[in-house]
């Protein structure tokens, strides 16, 4: 039986991206995304819940996220779930955290300084195609996560 691991998230950044590089030069951007869900309960009251998701972005896409995205900006992430497990150094207890490894990223909303009344821009890829004549935000070979020993945090 085959497995399938795909996640699509659309929300707002909870903090400015944290951009670092592995010793081999691979860019890694750590971002937080807040995803809201609004519904009406049986009593007719509007309810809202927010889910906070940690996302890792790699390669050239990570550099673009670090350069163009800031806290509060809307973003869409397509990727896969990843479970990190470790031993807590202080207590020795087993710890785990579910996060997302981004495979594609789209910047949403209007560009900064577009003006208050301007309509939001169409979603655009994380790699600006016009800038260097590069193709749109297709995953680039080598954009995947580096070996765990290379990750600087």
Image (cartoon, grey):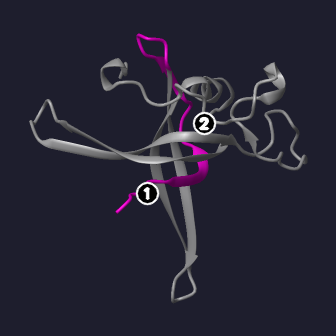
Left or right of 88, for residue 111: right
Number of numbered discs overlaid on the protein picture: 2
- Compared with 134, 105 (above or below) is below
Mark 1 lies on a secondary structure that is loop
Left or right of 129, for residue 55: left
Q: In which quarter of the view is residue 66 placed?
A: top right
Residue 72 visible somewhere in the drawing: no
Residue 60 in percent (x, y) is at 61, 24
Residue 119 visible somewhere in the drawing: yes
Q: Nearer the viewer, mark 1 or mark 2?
A: 1
Which quadrant holds the N terminus?
bottom left
Q: Which residue is mark 1?
A: 4
Q: Residue at the spot x=44%, y=54% of the render? A: 5
Q: Residue at the spot x=30%, y=20% of the render? A: 149
Residue 4 in percent (x, y) is at 43, 57
Q: Residue at the spot x=80%, y=42% of the render? A: 110
First to last magenta residue range: 1-26
Residue 90 in percent (x, y) is at 13, 31
Residue 61 in percent (x, y) is at 61, 29
Q: Earlier in the sequence, mark 1 or mark 2?
A: 1
Q: In which quarter of the view is residue 121 placed?
A: top right
Left or right of 86, for residue 15: right
State yes or no: residue 13 in magenta: yes
Alpha carbon distance from label 1 to label 2: 31 Å
Q: Which mark is residue 71?
A: 2
């Amino acid at each position: 039986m085959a497995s399938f691991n795909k996640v699509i998230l659309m929300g707002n950044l909870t903090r400015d991206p944290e951009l670092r590089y592995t010793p081999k030069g691979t860019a890694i951007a750590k971002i937080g995304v807040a995803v809201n869900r609004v519904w009406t309960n049986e009593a007719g009251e509007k309810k809202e819940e927010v889910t906070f998701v940690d996302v890792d972005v790699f390669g050239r896409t990570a550099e673009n996220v670090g350069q163009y995205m800031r806290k509060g900006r809307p973003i869409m992430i397509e990727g896969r779930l990843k479970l990190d497990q470790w031993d807590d150094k202080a207590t020795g207890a087993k710890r785990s955290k579910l996060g997302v490894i981004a495979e594609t990223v789209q910047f949403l909303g209007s560009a900064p300084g577009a003006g208050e009344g301007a309509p939001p821009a169409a979603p655009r890829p994380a790699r600006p195609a016009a800038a260097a004549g590069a193709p749109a935000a297709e995953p680039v070979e080598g954009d995947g996560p580096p070996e765990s020993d290379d990750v600087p945090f």
